[in-house]
Image: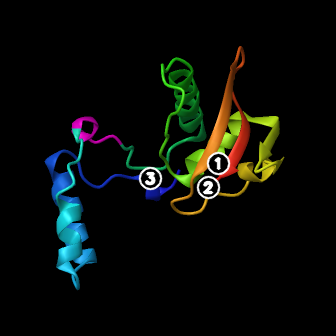
Amino acid sequence: MGKDSSGKWVGGKLQAGVRTTLRALYDDAPERAAPLCEVPLDLEMVQAKWWLGSRETEASVDARIEELGARLCYSPHNVIAVVGHSHYFRQLFRAQLDERATLDGGDASALTVQKLSNAGVARCEVEFRAEGARITAVQLL
């Protein structure tokens, strides 16, 4: 993982930083920034530094992927949104994409070498097997 995966703020500084950034982004139209600055943020999970500060090892990423698979497997929910960086998802596809998986009806193997576009969305169907989670179908939205 690269430095694009690093955090910048924690706790209350996160909300202040987001608001400052939004105001700067909409400097020419402050009326557009105002409602965005009022959106409440759930800061419970960002009270402490969560990032490494350096490049994450492949073994560490693989461990996080394995943990994600277990969390998904034992979740009571049938539909779950997972948010992350394209490099993480590429590694996820390398680890858990079934060899017969389809991408929009075709071959999904390109997902193991190409990254998702910025703000890209991939709808995945996952089967949980004895050997772990396996992604069986992907649809790019």
Query: Residue at 53% across / 35% down in the picture?
Result: 60
Q: Residue under circle 2?
A: 141
Q: Where does the magenta region start and end?
A: 44-50
Residue 15 tag number: none
- Residue 77: x, y in percent? 49, 24
Q: Mark 1: which amino acid? A: Arg
Would you say the residues marked 3 and 1 are in contact, meaning their CB atoms lie under 8 Å apart?
no
Q: Earlier in the sequence, mark 3 or mark 2?
A: 3
Residue 69 locus on image (x, y percent)? 58, 26
Q: Nearer the viewer, residue 121 or 49?
A: 121
Q: Callout 3 environment at 10 Å: few (<14), some (14 to 19), or many (20+)?
A: some
Q: CA distance from mark 3 to mark 2?
A: 23 Å
Which residue type carries mark 3? Answer: Ser
Left or right: where does residue 9 sit relative to residue 67? left
Residue 5: numbered disc: 3
Q: Which-is-in-front pick, marks 1 and 2?
A: 2
Q: Can you identify the residue that label 1 sits on?
A: 90
